[in-house]
Image: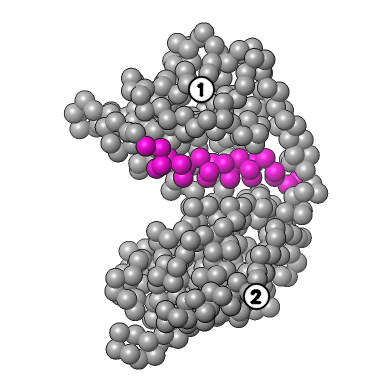
């Protein structure tokens, strides 16, 4: 992974924001947050977060030590100073003495200590940033690091790769208890450059923005190099029908099969806007003979469950001319998925099928959707998952390109299947 730090660009942002009354510390925080956010292999659609500890004036004009931490709803790649709301640091640190703190209480304390009462909610990982002493703290869900940190023997793999450079934090749901544990791990060896959070992601920290960023790039690059060395062929291709149905024929069936009836019995349905992807990585993933196994391995980091849920729906390959059979299988797969996991929230992981590709979407809140925008955030998350499954370490690795079935050319177009509304 390339180190994109530029002294010229850093100084330019310091001048640019300085003219608007933003201090150097925060301007540099904006700069490296954008560098991290612009790299999809680190963060997707605002995933991950960053912070800086600095001094600011409160509404009464008094100087106070604050933590400027990424606010919810901001994309790191396009962050502005307003996307890093300032929270009084002392009360946050005081919370560490508690035995327990519910998420609701945590959010209330964080909001109550915002310098600007109108600022966005600070990240759910705010306390983790606050409990660490460093001026700059960077956090990403790096695909390469997760490829190590999601393995059953992740602790050994990470220790082997990083030695004492990185502390290892066991998996705990993001929130107060994770923040406490991470601080304990750091304090056990304050020489570490960062922390690997098993099944979650990576933190790096330092007293300057440049060093915290460069430590992130270095740690991720090490994981990438390790993965590149240990790749082996892993995805044996599944047997597929000779001729596959086109995505345009398949999508309406999936949209119908996945429609959810209004539980209140109004007779209306929630429906998907679908999006079709068939990149080489996607095809390798969905064409694998063992899709059932690795497709149900769960998401790479807890954040992804918000967008994709934990498992995809897996349906058989759609054979041309046998769409009735495919439709019945799709309906059955959906029923099975509902039994397996409640279809929570407005987004549902949509069918992944052996070719023609991955079709996924989210429920369109409108009775008849017409815009694809809201669906676009979803495929990339699973896309990252696909990237990760495609490059695991030890025992797994580079895949042979899956055999493309005869007569099938994977469509590249995104397919808005709004017209299809039967169920
Ligand atoms: Zn995280």
Q: Is residue 322 magenta?
A: no
- In the picture, residue 133 is in which quadrant? bottom right
Question: 12 above or below 144?
Answer: below
Residue 60, given in percent of the width and then of the height, sits at 29, 89
Residue 16, given in percent of the width and then of the height, sits at 49, 76
The overriding secondary structure of the stretch rendered in magenta is helix
177 left or right of 116?
A: right
Q: Quadrant of the N terminus?
A: bottom right
Q: Is residue 381 magenta?
A: yes
Ligand 1 within 8 Å of disc 2? The answer is no
Q: Name the residue beneath numbered marker 1.
A: 247
Q: Quadrant of the C terminus?
A: top left
* Helix, strand or loop under label 2: helix
Q: What is the CA distance from the residue labelled 1 to the residue labelled 2?
A: 48 Å
Q: Nearer the viewer, mark 1 or mark 2?
A: 2
Q: Which is more toward the observer, 248 or 48?
A: 248
Q: Name the residue beneath numbered marker 2.
A: 7
Question: 30 above or below 321?
Answer: below
């Amino acid at each position: 992974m390339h180190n994109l730090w530029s002294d010229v660009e850093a100084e330019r942002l310091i001048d640019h924001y300085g003219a608007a009354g933003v201090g150097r510390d925060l301007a540099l925080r904006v700069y490296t947050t954008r560098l991290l956010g612009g790299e999809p292999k680190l963060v997707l659609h605002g995933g991950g977060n960053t912070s800086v500890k600095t001094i600011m004036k409160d509404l009464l004009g008094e100087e106070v030590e604050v933590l400027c931490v990424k606010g919810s709803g901001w994309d790191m790649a396009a962050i502005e100073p307003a996307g890093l709301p300032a929270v009084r640091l002392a009360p946050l640190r005081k919370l560490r003495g508690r035995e327990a703190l519910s998420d609701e209480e945590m959010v209330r304390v964080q909001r109550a200590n915002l310098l600007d009462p109108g600022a966005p909610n600070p990240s759910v990982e705010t306390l983790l940033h606050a409990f660490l002493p460093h001026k700059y703290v960077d956090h990403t869900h790096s695909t390469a690091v997760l490829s190590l940190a999601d393995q059953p023997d992740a602790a050994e793999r990470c220790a082997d790769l990083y030695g004492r450079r990185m502390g290892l934090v066991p998996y705990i749901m993001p929130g107060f208890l994770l923040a406490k544990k991470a601080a304990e791990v750091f304090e056990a060896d304050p020489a570490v450059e960062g922390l690997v959070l098993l099944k979650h992601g990576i933190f790096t920290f330092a007293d300057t923005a440049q060093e915290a960023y460069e430590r992130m790039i270095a740690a991720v690059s090490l994981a990438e190099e390790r993965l590149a060395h240990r790749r082996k062929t892993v995805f044996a291709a599944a047997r597929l029908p000779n001729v596959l149905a086109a995505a345009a024929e398949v999508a309406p069936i999936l949209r119908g099969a996945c429609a959810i009836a209004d539980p209140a019995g109004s007779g209306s349905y929630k429906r998907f806007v679908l999006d079709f992807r068939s990149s080489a990585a996607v095809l390798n993933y969905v064409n694998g003979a063992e899709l059932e196994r690795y497709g149900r391995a769960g998401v790479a980091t807890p954040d992804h469950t918000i967008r994709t849920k934990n498992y995809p729906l897996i349906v058989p390959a759609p054979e041309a001319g046998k769409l009735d059979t495919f439709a019945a299988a799709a309906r059955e797969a959906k029923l099975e998925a509902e039994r397996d996991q409640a279809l929570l929230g407005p987004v549902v992981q949509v069918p992944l099928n052996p070719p023609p590709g991955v079709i996924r979407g989210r429920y369109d809140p409108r009775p008849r959707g017409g815009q694809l925008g809201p669906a676009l955030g979803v495929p990339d998350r699973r896309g990252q998952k696909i990237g990760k499954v495609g490059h695991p370490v030890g025992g797994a690795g580079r895949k042979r390109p899956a055999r493309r079935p005869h007569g099938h050319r994977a469509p590249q177009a995104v397919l808005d299947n709004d017209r299809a509304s039967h169920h």
